[in-house]
Image (tube, helix red, strand yellow):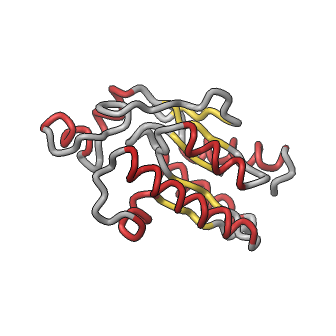
Amino acid sequence: MWITGLPASGKSTLAVFLRTELAERGIDAAVLESDVLRLVFTPHSDYDEQDRETFYRRMTWVGALLVRHGVPVIFDATANRRAYRDEARRQIERFLEVYVECPLEVCMSRDPKGIYRLGREGGARHVPGSQDPYEPPLAPDLVIRGDAGEPSESARRIIETLSSRRYL
């Protein structure tokens, strides 16, 4: 599954809760967190379109490989272009796109990594939702509010969706 949304929308928090919920059911899912994988795949990234395309192509390849070997995967990544997520859907047969919808103003007020601040100050040129566009899913499999509700409840909603599709 791909958890997408603006930076600071709540994707990583949701991924942590979801992984815990799955573990309680005996399912060991791999969380592919973009911040961690960037250090390996594109450590000196400018975050421009070419760097992002390379990064998401590699991330999708790793995720698809894990899935082919029976490892459930949670992509925790903004993936600001629909094309990145659509490519993952093409490569992974049983795919779920979860959109963490959260107003930009809320994300900017959270800003745990300081990327929106860096964007305002000129230290980052390609912040999705700010300098670069974020293309929300046109037909996500599930929409989660990132500014309302509890992450544990959102994780349970995802589990219910996975179960109803017989992915679990």
Q: Quadrant of the C terminus?
A: bottom right
Percent across and percent down for residue 80 are: 46, 39
Q: Which residue is at the far bottom?
A: 69
Tell me which residue sits at (53%, 57%) in the image. 16
Tell me which residue sits at (49%, 50%) in the image. 77
Residue 153 seen anywhere in this rendered image of the structure: no
Q: Is residue 6 left or right of residue 140?
A: left
Tell me which residue sits at (37%, 28%) in the image. 104
Q: How many marks?
A: 0
Percent across and percent down for residue 39 are: 36, 67
Percent across and percent down for residue 157 are: 69, 41
- Image-quadrant location for residue 118: top left
Nearer to the camera, 50 or 2 = 50
- Image-quadrant location for residue 111: top left
Answer above or below: position of 114 versus 40: above
Tell me which residue sits at (43%, 38%) in the image. 9
Answer above or below: position of 72 versus 14: below
- Image-quadrant location for residue 6: top left
Q: Is residue 91 left or right of residue 52?
A: right
Residue 54 seen anywhere in this rendered image of the structure: yes
